[in-house]
Image (spheres, rainbow, N blue to C red):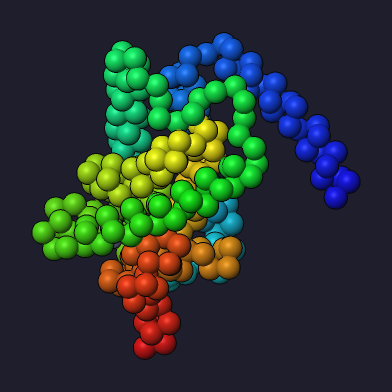
Amino acid sequence: MEATKSFLDQVLPQATASWAHIMANYSPQKIEFVGTLIVQLLSFWLPSICYMLLEVIAPSFSQRHKIQPAPKQPTCHEIAHCFIVVLQNQILTSILHLILISAASYAGIKSTYRIETPLPAPIEILRDVVLSLLIREALFYYSHRILHIPALYIPIHKKHHRFTAPIALAAQFAHPIEHIFANTLPISLPPQLLGSHVVTFWVFLAYELVNTATVHSGYDFFHNKAKMHDLHHEKFNLNYGSLGLLDWVHGTDQLKKHRTA
Ligand SMILES: [Zn+2]
Ligand SMILES: [Zn+2]
């Protein structure tokens, strides 16, 4: 307890001073755009690449922890194609973010995130992250289920399902429409609806991106966290959500039945 207190006592004033320095030297628009991009690079691209390198660096360890067998894994050509599509999606959402920020600034509208010098209290961060997780679950579950309607599945969502044995980067291997409406908005909207501090948004974004890279990684790490969504990629008609809450409510959480069948 004492150690935790002294660690926080040391870190918090430093973090507060660094944040005040950033706020004093850069525009809110620049802070929102660059900060969000840095979080995407550190919590999606970096862990995704680490997960994928595991197969090259430690092949036998990787084989032992892969959920699906080797013959089902994607080829090098498919992985390279995945990288290009995910990079295009990253560029698309970054350009859209830049356009929205610039248009709002031009019209004199403040950001929908709170970008201010006082940092949010840890309890406020915790409250907003928990509420954002619940709102995101609803937005993602229903947008994902709508994407499974045949009229939308074939032209849009089928692309994301191309990886029946997913890899971390395939989390964002998706049609641009899906990437905006099912991936980006369900994560960026909840903190905006709650009027959260931009730092809280980054904490939530970082968690969601590490989580999506992990559930698509194809590995059984973190108590088999990937198994639920991995099974969605394998069987298509179950586990649409992220937390499992709405799958339980709607009876689409049939993991056990499928595994034991
Ligand atoms: Zn997926
Ligand atoms: Zn799906």
> Up-down: is 192 above or below 101?
below
Q: Is residue 123 left or right of residue 215?
A: right
Image quadrant where residue 218 sits: bottom left
Q: Nearer the viewer, residue 71 or 65?
A: 65
Residue at x 21% of width, y 59% of height: 146
Residue 35 rendering spot, x and y as whole percentages: 50, 28
The quadrant of the image that shows the C terminus is bottom left
Residue 60 rendering spot, x and y as whole percentages: 57, 64
> Up-down: is 98 above or below 218?
above
Q: Residue furthest top?
A: 25
Q: Nearer the viewer, residue 175 or 142?
A: 142
Residue at x 27% of width, y 71% of height: 237
> Up-down: is 67 above or below 11?
below
Q: Nearer the viewer, residue 33 or 156?
A: 33
Residue 179 rendering spot, x and y as whole percentages: 29, 44
Is residue 152 visible to the viewer in this orientation of the structure? yes
